[in-house]
Amino acid sequence: MQVYPIETGNFKLDGGAMFGVVPKVIWQKSNPADSNNLIDMSLRCMLIEDGDRLTLIDNGTGNKQSDKFFSYYFPFGDADLDASLKKYGFHRDDITDVFLTHLHFDHCGGSIQWNKNRTGYEPAFKNARFWSNENHWTWATQPNPREKASFLKENINPIENSGQLNHVPIPENGFLKDGPLGFDILFADGHTEKQMIPHLKYQDKTLVFMADLLPTVGHIPLPYVMSYDVRPLMTMNEKAKFLNTAADHGYYLFLEHDAQHQLCTLKHTEKGVRLDQTFQFDEIFN
């Protein structure tokens, strides 16, 4: 097995929304804001090469939305999905599986693209199976008012219409061992219904793709919860359990949205679980 970090670009989000009730004077120490109160965010994905299977976990925002849409999120930087895949010798047509942690636009927008005539949409990974789960799919296709702006029909419906959609089974205990793509999956409900957090055994370490359970290292303290979370108290409980486990067992956390750090580890302190170290991916894995 080989794992690769796939940088698909960067964007900006409101710092207050990203940290909820935590005052700016505190969160700006770890995530400095610009003059518009916006903080830098990455759109980092993960590529897993395992035998004849090539799995992409999440795929960024894509590029089919309007200029007006993107103007709200200030995309920046030169990274894009195709260039990142090419760096490691791959093309999007090589992807066999696209695993979507959840269906918010910044995680699944790259799944679907315009067709050649721009008269409709088609899968951006024509040879891939797309993976969600039934509970989250229903949640996203019948969205609540709070999340409706993040669940875009043009990102979601064409996946089902393509016939390439598959669902991961949901275990009663919320943790799936040896899932259909060869890794374990933690299901979390605080940010959105049945977000999926992949756990990989890789080079004798546990590597966890954090998605929105832990967006950046600045979100490690328990009260640092996004306003985007539909069940913030549940997020705090899910974080507490996971962070303690991660610190106990020395997990390496792969950060999807941290613009500065690709990986981090955690440690126990008198104030609770806190950041231990940060790394770039190739400092730990080769």
Image (tube, rainbow, N blue to C red):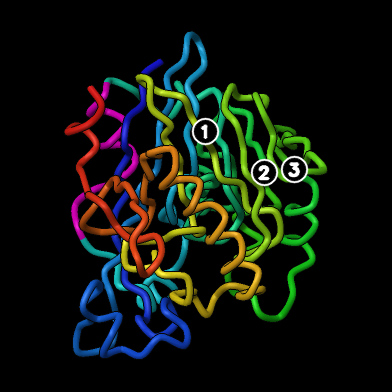
Q: Which of 148 and 277 is in front in this view?
A: 277
Where in the figure is residue 135, as x and y percent of width and height? 79, 52
Q: Element at badge 2? A: helix
Kindly indicate the quadrant of the structure image that contains residue 86: top left
Q: Is residue 117 above or below residue 20?
A: above
Q: Mark 1 points at which residue?
A: 125
Question: Label 3: few (<14), some or many (≥20) within 10 Å?
Answer: few
Q: Which of 271 and 193 is in front in this view?
A: 271
* Residue 86 drawn in magenta: yes
> What is the distance, in whole Å, between disc 2 and disc 3 at their CAs?
5 Å
Q: Which of marks 2 and 1 is nearer the N terminus?
A: 1
Image mark for residue 177: none
Circle 2 sits on which residue?
159
Q: In this view, does 137 lie to the left or right of 86?
A: right
Name the amino acid, label 1: Phe
Give neighbour class at mark 2: few <14, some 14-19, many 20+ (Cα, 10 Å): many
**189 or 134: which is nearer to us?**
189
Q: Split into 4 quadrants, where in the image is the C terminus?
A: top left
| Separation of marks 2 and 1 at Cα, in angstroms | 10 Å
Give x and y (percent) for residue 218.
Answer: 32, 68
Q: How many labels does the image show?
A: 3
Please name the residue that numbered disc 3 is placed on: 161
Residue at 71 percent of width and 36 percent of height: 165
Q: Distance between the residues labelled 1 and 3?
A: 14 Å
Callout 2 amino acid: Ile
The residue range painted magenta reads 77-88
Image quadrant holding the N terminus, namely top left
Q: Which amino acid does label 3 sit on?
A: Asn
Residue count near mark 1 (Cα–Cα under 10 Å), binned few <14, some 14–19, many ≥20: many
Q: Quadrant of residue 216?
A: bottom left
Residue at left 45%, top 45%?
246
